[in-house]
Image (cartoon, grey):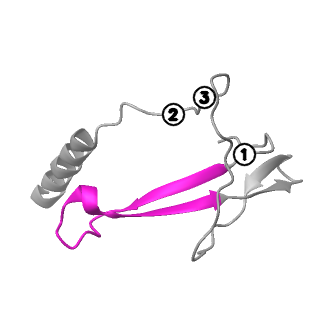
Amino acid sequence: MRNSTGGLEFVWTGDMWQSAPNGIKAHDRQFWSQLRWEYDAAAGVDMPMGIEWQDSWTLDIADPTPTQQPVMYSSNFSLSKWNERLRQKAAIETNE
């Protein structure tokens, strides 16, 4: 995301699978953290720094205007297909 000074901000999000007390996937907890970068001389590129817990943090993002719309990323990843593959793999492993 663009911040208010025109730089880029990166956010990492992760689902905490099977964390919902009621078992509903849509109620699972999530973890969000800002990604910070540092230059790695050996690799010659910026690398993400380690993620550390923060009780709270502020994300400075620019207000979208007609000439600067937020970019939304999506994929065709299907959780139901993934879960079906896991079930098939588990069935094969338990039958061996």
Q: Name the residue under label 2.
A: 72
Disc 3 crowd, CA 10 A, few/some/many (<14, 14-19, 20+): few
Classify residue 49 by image quadrant. bottom right
Is 84 magenta? The answer is no
Q: What residue type is labelled 2?
A: Met
The image shows residue 59 at horizontal and vertical percentages of 65, 56
Badge 1 marks a residue whose secondary structure is loop
Drawn side of residue 19 relative to residue 21, left or right:
right
Image quadrant in which the N terminus is located: top right
Mark 1–mark 3 Cα distance, whole angstroms, equals: 13 Å
Disc 2 crowd, CA 10 A, few/some/many (<14, 14-19, 20+): few
Of the two numbered discs 2 and 3 in the rendering, the one whose residue sits closer to the viewer: 3
Q: Residue at x 14, y 57 (%)?
A: 96
Kindly check if marks 1 and 3 are in contact, taking CB atoms under 8 A apart as contact: no
Q: Which amino acid does label 3 sit on?
A: Gln
Drawn side of residue 38 relative to residue 74, left or right:
right
Kindly check if marks 2 and 3 are in contact, taking CB atoms under 8 A apart as contact: no
Q: Mark 1 points at which residue?
A: 3
Mark 2–mark 3 Cα distance, whole angstroms, equals: 9 Å
Q: Residue at x 42, y 32 (%)?
A: 75
Badge 2 marks a residue whose secondary structure is loop
Asked whether 86 or 34 is in front, the reply is 34
Q: Which residue is drawn at 21% across and 50% down?
A: 89
Q: Mark 3 points at which residue?
A: 69
Badge 3 marks a residue whose secondary structure is loop
Mark 1–mark 2 Cα distance, whole angstroms, equals: 15 Å
- Above or below, 1 against 20 in this view is above
Q: Please report the bounds of the magenta region as a residue range.
A: 10-34
